[in-house]
Image (cartoon, coloured by chain):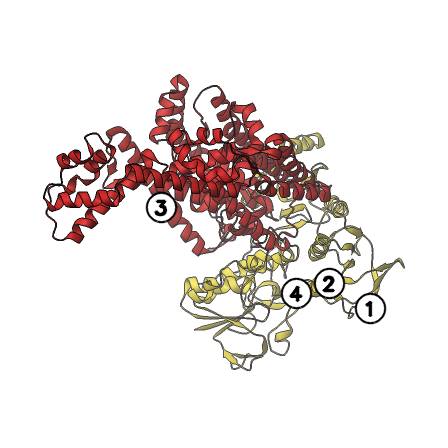
Chain colours: A red, B yellow
Amino acid sequence: MNRLGTILVVIGFGIFLAIPFLTEHNVSDSFITKEYNSEERAKLASSAYTSILNQDITTWKLLATTDEAIALVNKSVIDTYGFSGEDIIRLENLAHNNSLNAQSIEALWGKGNFKVEAFKNYGSWLFDREFSSDEELESNIKQVTNNIAQYEVIPKKGIDKYAAKSLKYSISKHSITGLLQNNAVLFLLLTFGLTAIGGLLMLQVFMDEKPGIKNNGIFFHPAKARKWLGIIIGTLLISFYILLYFFPEYMGGWIRIVDPISYKLNGSEAGQFFLYGFMYTTSMLVMGARMMAKYRHNKYQLIRTGSVMFFQTIFAFLIPEILVRLNQPYFDFKNAWPLDYDFFFDFELQKLIAGGNLGMFMLVWGIAFSLIGVPIFTYFYGKRWYCSWVCGCGGLAETIGDPFRQLSDKSLRAWKIERYMIYSVLVFAVVMTVGVLYTYFTGASELLGINTFSMRQVYGAFIGAGFSGVVGTGFYPLMGNRVWCRFGCPLAAYMGIVQKIKSRFRITTNGGQCISCGNCSTYCEMGIDVRSYAQRGENIVRASCVGCGVCAAVCPRGVLKLENDSPTNRVNTTNFVRR
Amino acid sequence: MHVVIIGNGISGITTARHIRKLSDHQITVISSESEYFFSRTALMYIYMGHMKFEHTQPYENWFWEKNKIDLVFDRVTDLNTDNQSLSLTSGETISYNKLVLALGSTPRPLPTKGAELSGVQPMYSKQDLELLEDTKNIKQAVIIGGGLIGIELAEMLHSRGVHVTLAVRESQYWDIVLPPEEAKMVGDHILSRGIDLRLGTAVESINGSDKVESVTLGTGENIDCQFVGATIGVVANIGLIKNTSIETNRGILVDEHLQTNLPNIYAIGDCAEIKEPNTGRRAVEAVWYTGRIMGESLAQTICDKPTPYNPGIWFNSAKFVDLEYQTYGDVPAKIEGELTSIFWNELEPERSLRIVYEKDLMKVRGFNVLGLRLRHELCDEWIKTGKTMDFVLNHLEELNFDPEFYKKFASQVKSQFEALV
């Protein structure tokens, strides 16, 4: 069974990896017209496509051609709407005559002309100015005309980098033809289906053994001990996240095969984040089943794992999709700010406000949940109620990430770095949120001299995508399964402060029974040196503890117990060990 | 003052750490086993792939220099108590003002014929683990001895797919410590985990020309094997002081302040034998926490706060493959005389609880559990204050240290007891 499972996983995953190479595209004239969304642009672009028109081509060929086409469009709009060399000479001449001003350029090209209006916007600072030299004059004018080309002509008349990104994605996704286009369901089964079935069959390995701790051979394993397979898996994960966040146009084939599911759920085609959500959920379910098989003797692990599987499937995946189908705002009820960092972004707020009664409920719920629910629950149960029972990131770490938990760094140095990083991200998240709300309510684009829009862009790219995705998950096989939760998650930082300062939660150390073996520290995914407390007979109260309970499970002497109890005397030291 | 500690196990290292906390004395710790302190109890997990060696080190390597504890990785070859100095293999001589002997144990040599063959080894030190790691291509192994190390070694080899026969001379597993019901449960558990436990089985001889090839049991049965584990217990490691005037019996004899018959020389941990042990405690106790407590106490004494060694009420724990064991207080293998007990157990999941109490006064004296966990602090307090069975059974749930959501046991135990009386 285990061998068959392994074979199915290798086949299913192999086909999945092959899909980008099996994806074929075919573009027609009318398709190009439609995608470029303007007769004019389509006409300019079409010359790039002539050689591949109505032919089956690869994604790379298609995207390279599209890059050329976009360049052609942009060159042409600059020729048409931008300033030519001759135009620049004319402007210089006006300046020489001390008559570079709105009237003179209107006289040149006519009032209301695109060029004129643009120059008035971008170049008014040159009007009626003295220039110390011809060089200065020329460089100033060129600076203005270049800015106009970049910020005015291309975005308004041509295709800027954001438009290019979505255009390339759309062309790639919508031009798929042949095998994948016609057999999406088949490929869905061959990839996700086979991998999932194989994964479940592989659980036999645990079921063959009697219930109990199953850590045999972990540090000899090629994937679980940072050996060759771990490095390969890490590389694949990192590549996947880079594609997902930065180059989704190459993922058309993968997205295509989940289209049928997307249509069933929300009534429209899949996008890259639907694919991601689907992969996330199915992998969590399979690996959650693995976690349950592995810890089937431990009821805390069974219930907890069931809980993260439930919240991911129902709250993070299904409910938002069904809401969309019902024309309601996409909303994950269990996501809390500041992990849900864009909750207070203008478009999100507008979406909820426009969403009628349900939208308003979501708005109130989200705020109350994050600001009142989170600290109250954390007071009663520690942050584990969220991090290892509800959270999607935590759920991923506890299921798919479980094989890598022993790779977290336990050194004091790592702890120090962790504290600097996670609290910096929290501060960043709070400042950014205050900034965007300030902009939302006052309309001012800057807060204390910082542009709030760029603040949120930087956060989204570096923390939202880069940290939580690429590093946070991609590095599972290299740095353990809680890289994001430990070093980056602002919600974990926020709950950690509550947990450390005032909470009923602690890990109790059982008198003097500790033998310093180190199982607890080794298997702590958060890199807490649990042993250093246990061997002193001291209870463990740490901001970072997510309460997964694995330390207590692997302890061979019954030394550790996760408990909620009176918050006074939490860090109690028994008199069995002198400190 | 220069304190020299021979041995970097839990006893020696605890002494060093606590002396540092209390004083500025110069501290040197000498070991020939490992450069840095590691947890001996975790060696098995390295072999089983649960951990790497570095995980068994409770302190990071920078810790020692930062705390000015000098570590010497060398063997002491000679001890001169007259001029208070010792010599190392390297030729270096170290003098001391106070000497702490934390020499540990050494495996009891196997008296069996053929014990000298290659492939026969104990499992005690880091070097034993390395030797075991070098022994490749083992298909079958026979382990001799029914103690805690025997079952650990069996579990280690079994985890790598070796067929293990565990030959135990006694008629029940570890029956010098466990009452019959618990011994039976542990024995059954070991069998259920695929280890071929042979009770009441003596090993007559180990056979082979150079390497071990088989063993012959007392029954005459021959078992083919490429490895023999010699785990018939440990004895105090006192070879170093044989030629000195330090008094020994089974171990190095010490008074309540852990001092030997010579001033300025102390002995702690597995190698120490307490001349007048407290009631309920034995003279030599080779367990982790007694080493730790001796280290803590001795550090106080050395730093001019004379502190007698007082380990309190006996407790211990172990794990037999997947079955955890804890014990608190007085639970003799044979419960008789003024003592009696109530025993509750369950097969699915395997777990048991025994409460030992005084027949006439109904005062609790000890607890034994398999497959469940009890709260040390409460067990200790209840035994110390002589709580009655009535109290114990009514508050049993408070003792429960199992993880959340585990099946409770208190009400079952209580009703069984009530049915009994």
- Between A104 and A198, the one lying in front of the other is A104
Label 1 CA crowd tier, 10 Å (few <14, some 14–19, many 20+): few
Counting from the top left corner in percent of width and height, residue A436 is at 30, 34
The answer to whether residue B209 is left or right of residue B291 is right
Counting from the top left corner in percent of width and height, residue B408 is at 62, 33
Residue B340 visible in the displayed image: no
- Between B384 and A204, the one lying in front of the other is A204
| SS type, badge 4 | helix
Counting from the top left corner in percent of width and height, residue B289 is at 57, 56
| SS type, badge 2 | loop
Task: Name the residue carrying label 3.
Answer: A424
Task: Name the residue carrying label 4.
Answer: B130
Task: Name the residue carrying label 1.
Answer: B113
Q: Are marks 1 and 4 on the same chain?
A: yes
Task: Name the residue carrying label 2.
Answer: B136
Amino acid at circle 1 = Lys
Name the chain under label 2: B
Which mark lies nearer to you, 1 or 4?
4
Residue B170, labelled with which disc? none
Quarter of the image containing the C terminus of chain B? top right
C-alpha span from label 4 to label 2: 11 Å
